Image (tube, rainbow, N blue to C red):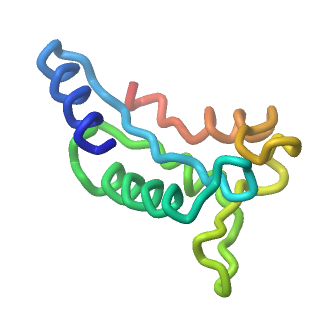
Amino acid sequence: MIAGYLQLVREAHARGVRVIGATIPPFHGSAYWTERGEDVRTAVNAWVRTGGAYDAVVDFDRVLAAPADPERPKEVKIKDEYAFAPDRLHMNDAGYKAMADAIDLNSL
């Protein structure tokens, strides 16, 4: 994923386009969650935050994540008030509003 992101950023920058990176929100509790997937999400998010490839970063992970259970640190879920209950993968209206509010409009 990181190699693909780097290619997209390079191509956008070559055309004078600013690129805003975003972290991947938590998805534990959805039908798609696996421990391997969580490891990838965690690694990609760390790179998005610190890799320096983007002109700006919005951290959807930190905005949407419920506090981690110290006994199960990989089982990070979307905060209940932001989760679309049937699938625990998508956000409800409040979650999407929180995501929009997290974007620094000056970075656009």
Determine which quarter of the picture holds residue 29.
bottom right
Q: Is residue 47 left or right of residue 11?
A: right
Image coords of residue 60 (percent x, y): 55, 46
For the point 65% across and 65% down, the residue is 76
Image coords of residue 20 (percent x, y): 36, 32
Residue lying farthest left?
14
Q: Is residue 52 left or right of residue 97?
A: left
For the point 68% across and 41% down, the residue is 98
For the point 74% across and 39% down, the residue is 91
Determine which quarter of the picture holds residue 95.
top right
- In the rendered image, which quarter contains the N terminus? top left
* Foreground of the two, 47 or 36: 36
Image position of 56 with respect to 19: above or below: below
Residue lying farthest bottom?
71
* Count of numbered circles in the view: 0
Q: Is residue 83 left or right of residue 96?
A: right
* Foreground of the two, 18 or 12: 12
For the point 39% across and 24% down, the residue is 108
Image coords of residue 43 (percent x, y): 38, 60
Determine which quarter of the picture holds residue 34.
bottom right
Image coords of residue 59 (percent x, y): 49, 49
Residue lying farthest top?
15
Image position of 78 with respect to 108: above or below: below
